[in-house]
Image: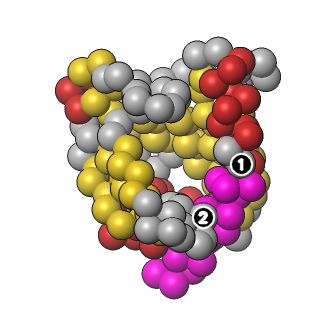
């Protein structure tokens, strides 16, 4: 995959340097049992995760709210660059099958992991079809929620 250049009108970006090695960040993103430990910002939880780490493979998660409401999400992996880039979308299901996203908006996530000294430059980009979808995602708390989840990923990675 060539480097993706975010469109500020349509995309949301979280970029930080974290003090864990890139291979641990990758492992936390691609190992279902680890991803379940950090993917939802507390007090939310991720109760299920299935990853078939190949283009066309499944990227499914289920989140639970503090009130007990369950939110399943099914997606498709588009790009796997071992240790450095993971791209998945909620606009397709496994096998690149188009899906209808009920009550939400499809988006594509680009997770970039780069060595930075002894840590990792981490960039999560959420790509949206239009400004309304971007605003909805932003209003849901993308920066705070994905930032909290990244803090939790770092906790998990440091425990490995």
Tell whether position 31 is magenta.
no
Give the farthest residue toward the bottom.
Answer: 159
Quick one: 27 or 149, which is closer to the camera? 149
Q: Secondary structure at mark 1?
A: loop
Q: Secondary structure at mark 2?
A: loop
| SS majority, magenta | helix
Tell whether position 156 is magenta.
yes
59 on left or right of 148: left
Point out residue 112 in the picture as x, y percentages from the top left corner.
58, 42
Q: Which residue is mark 2?
A: 41
Badges 1 and 2: C-beta atoms under 8 Å apart? Answer: yes
Q: Is residue 155 visible to us here?
A: yes
Point out residue 98 in the picture as x, y percentages from the top left corner.
30, 19
Q: Which residue is mark 1?
A: 141
Asked if residue 103 is positioned above or below residue 155 in the image, the reply reads above
User: Residue at (50%, 41%) from the top-left corner?
Assistant: 85
Q: Is residue 119 visible to us here?
A: no
134 on left or right of 72: right
User: Residue at (51%, 84%) from the top-left corner?
Assistant: 159
Give the farthest residue toward the left.
Answer: 95
CA distance separating discs 1 and 2: 10 Å
Residue stretch in magenta = 144-160
Q: Which mark is residue 43?
A: none
Point out residue 48 in the picture as x, y percentages from the top left corner.
31, 62
- Quarter of the image for residue 128 reads top right
Give the farthest residue toward the right.
Answer: 8
Quick one: 28 or 117, which is closer to the camera? 28
How many discs appear? 2
User: Residue at (74%, 55%) from the top-left corner?
Assistant: 144
- N-term mark: 1 or 2: 2
User: Residue at (79%, 22%) from the top-left corner?
Assistant: 8
């Amino acid at each position: 995959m060539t480097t993706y250049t975010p469109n500020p009108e349509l995309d949301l970006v979280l970029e930080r340097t974290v003090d864990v090695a890139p291979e641990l960040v990758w492992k936390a993103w691609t190992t279902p049992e680890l991803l379940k430990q950090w993917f939802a910002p507390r007090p939310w939880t991720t109760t299920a995760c299935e990853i078939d780490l190949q283009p066309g493979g499944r990227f499914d998660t289920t989140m639970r709210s503090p009130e007990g409401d369950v939110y399943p999400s099914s997606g498709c992996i588009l790009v796997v660059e071992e240790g450095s880039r993971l791209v998945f979308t909620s606009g397709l299901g496994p096998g690149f099958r188009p899906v209808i996203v009920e009550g939400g908006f499809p988006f594509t996530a680009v997770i970039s992991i780069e060595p930075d000294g002894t840590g990792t430059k981490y960039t999560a980009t959420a790509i949206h079809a239009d400004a309304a979808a971007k605003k909805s995602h932003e209003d849901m708390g993308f920066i705070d929620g994905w930032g909290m989840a990244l803090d939790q990923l770092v906790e998990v990675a440091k425990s490995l």
